[in-house]
Structures are given as C-alpha cells and as structure tokens.
Image (cartoon, rainbow, N blue to C red):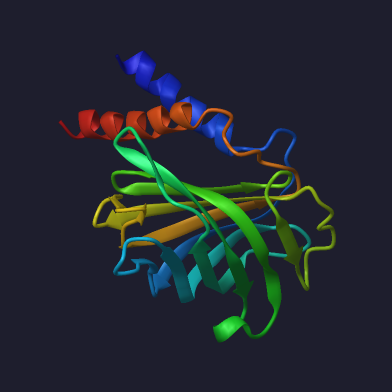
Amino acid sequence: MKVALLAAVASVALLAAPAHATTILTFGQTSGNPITATANLAGTSTTIDATNAAVDITEIEGGVATPAFLDLALTSTDAATPLGSGGFQHYSGTFSITSGLGGGGTNFLSGDFADIVLGVGPSAVLSSGSPPDVIDLTSDVIPDLTPPSAISLSFANLTPAFTIDNDTIGSFTSSVSGTFSATAVPEPASLGLLAVGMLGIRVLARRRLV
C-alpha cells in the first residue's frame, strides 16, 4: 500500500513539472490576505482572487530572492467536472508579482493566462502550459520570457475543503505557492492519474499522523 501511494505522489510531481524546464521564478506566501475563491449564488461561476498577498520570491532568473506582493484575478470559463472525490475546472485571468502594493514598483513577473484547476480535499493545483494554454508574461528583471511558458500554482489548506457547487468550484480560502517556467507544462495527460496522486498524498499524510 505504501509503495502504491509513493508512486501516486511521484506521478503528481511528474505531471506538474515541465520536461527540460528552465525555472524563471518560484515563490511562497508568507502572510497577508489569503487566496479567495468565490462561487456566485447560482453556482455557475467562480472567481479566484488575491490582493496584496505577501510572498517571498525564493528563486528568480536575472535577480535575487526578495519579498514581494501577489495579485491574482481568475474567472471560470466552463462548468466544473467531478473527478473522484474532487474535480476540475478551466479558468482565465491575470496575475502580478511586484515590489509594491497594488501591482506597483518593480514588476518581477506578471501576465495573463488560461489554465486548469484541479482539486481534492484540502488542496488544489492550477496548471497552465503553452501550448495548448495561453500564457503572456512580462517582467522588469527577467531577461528571457520566450515561449513556450508554464505556470503551476499550489493552493493549500483550503477552508472549507474542495467541493463542486452545482456547476462550479465551491467557495474557499487558502494559501498559495507557485513556480513559473520557460518551457511548457501540458495539461495532465491523465486527469485521473493526477487525482489519484493527490488522493495518495492525503492518505499518506493521514497514515503518518496515526
């Protein structure tokens, strides 16, 4: 059982990481406003937002690690699809990671993109790779943003846990960390495999707590 769970966890890492990737920026949230997902009253659409979330840039091409602020604005573009005990939904929107509040100061990295969000239990993953997804990046400090590009955001400690509300992902708050790369991360070849991997992480964590 343990071997199977470790294999499932490894499958998530393989699907989320781009082959031959060049990482241009990684970050982790330190404090400040949480990520907020808000489903509309009809349960047909969800927005995922962050405003002035304090983050630490832990790696950046052409620069040094530094504190920054994340702004994020995503809106669902289709109906959510249940998958096991979780599900997925496509989103599009914008983000910025800057030295100042409200997107001001140095633009470490910003852009717009279309993506897929897959979640289960207390976790969710946003994965966007071009092609087929659309990513347009700009930066004041990163010298090479030649496509294809890739984005991977991890949402942790979802409160409440991941749900599908009628036709859309249910409301939640969470923390966030992320990786931006200079090569494509294709959408998972098997969403089922990714879901199994995320479930494996949950089960393995529970076993360690017992």
Q: What residue sits 32% from the left and 17% below the top?
A: 2
Give above or below for 191 relative to 154.
Answer: above
Residue 100 appears anywhere in the view: no
Q: Residue furthest left?
A: 210
Position of residue 32 in the picture relative to residue 70 (left or right): left
| Frontmost residue, 157 versus 58 | 157
Q: Which quadrant would residue 95 be assigned to in this image?
A: bottom right
Task: Provide residue 203's location: percent of width, then percent of height.
Answer: 27, 30
| Frontmost residue, 9 versus 173 | 173
Q: Quadrant of the N terminus?
A: top left
Q: Which quadrant would residue 131 be assigned to in this image?
A: top right
Task: Provide residue 84's location: percent of width, then percent of height.
Answer: 32, 32
Q: What residue sits 76% from the left and 69% below the top?
A: 139
Q: What residue sits 57% from the left and 34% below the top?
A: 188
Position of residue 12 in the picture relative to residue 92 (left or right): left
Position of residue 131 in the picture relative to residue 154 (left or right): right
Give above or below for 206 relative to 156.
Answer: above
Residue 135 appears anywhere in the view: yes
Q: Quadrant of the C terminus?
A: top left
